[in-house]
Amino acid sequence: MIQLRATARLLVAFGAAIAAMALLVPAASAKEPAPGYERFAGCPSPEENPATVFCIRSDVKSGHLQTGKKDVTIENPLSLVGGLDGQLENFSANSKGGLSKAKQKVPGGVIGITGLTWLAEFFGVEALTLYATTELAGTPSNFTFNEVTLPVKAHLETPSGVLGKNCYVGSNTDPMTLHLITGTTNPPPPNEPITGKEGEFAETETLLTFKGGTFVDNEFAAPGASGCTLTLFGFIPISLNGLVNSQAGLPSPAGTNETVQNLDLELTLQELVYP
């Protein structure tokens, strides 16, 4: 099992040689990556965060996130981009980084998550399409090629805005904390252990890559919904939190939720991204 922490030490050991090669890279502005490193634009430059040593990018290609009674397929890829210090800790990102906002369609739409069939008469079926966007609810940590911890929340949105602008499952103070691993989980019942898959590791003089990994977690808990508000006639607010929780089976305790994420990961030195 190859750990990112160990390979990062290898990069540091060859740091002098890599730094010398960086001198050959065309100069870039303080906040614009060098040619060939544009995909790391969310990693802080030295001016933005002098403690950053490594730039990291993780691309989730597919998978699913099941919380309570709702299972959302990851159809639209999302990426996590940022920087880490010399110990592969203290994740940070600039305005171009963090977790990209990729909307995923929620089966059943607004009617499926509220049970209010009469909404179709007011808004039409198309306007009741429901999307879930996973957002960071804290700082990612525990980065290796075999695990990562992500505190997240799910933003529930519709074209009609029928749930309001601040309908979330989870929050910054009460997130879903995903401890994603490529190994085997140890969930409380009724969930049973599931196993991920280690990806293919490769390294060049300037880049570490990990492709085709499957990260899993079915040990996390999912909080209830908050901020879900239907405003009738433009001025009558009605809280839908209770209906959303009832229909979606929230809050759902550890051992009743699951996520599987198929992803690629890349790691390089900040001084190569911003020579």
Image (spheres, rainbow, N blue to C red):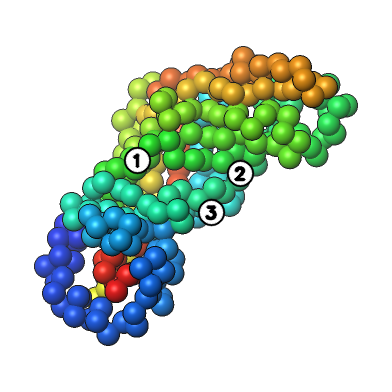
Residues 68 and 89: in front is 89
Residue at 43 percent across and 35 percent down: it is 137
**Sooner in the amino-acid sequence: mark 3 or mark 1:** 3
Q: Quadrant of the C terminus?
A: bottom left
Marks 3 & 1, CB-CB < 8 Å contact? no
Q: Which residue is mark 2?
A: 104
Residue in the foreground of this view, choosing between 21 and 63: 21
Above/below status of 118 relative to 15 = above
Classify residue 83 by image quadrant.
Answer: bottom left
Mark nearer the viewer, 2 or 1: 1
Residue 219 position, x and y percent, is: 37, 29
Give the amino acid at mark 3.
Answer: Pro
Above or below, comparing residue 179 to residue 264 in the picture: above
Instruction: List x then y, in percent, for residue 32.
Output: 41, 69
Closer to the chain start, of discs 2 and 3, is 3
Question: Residue 77 got which mark?
Answer: 3
The residue under label 2 is which amino acid type? Gln
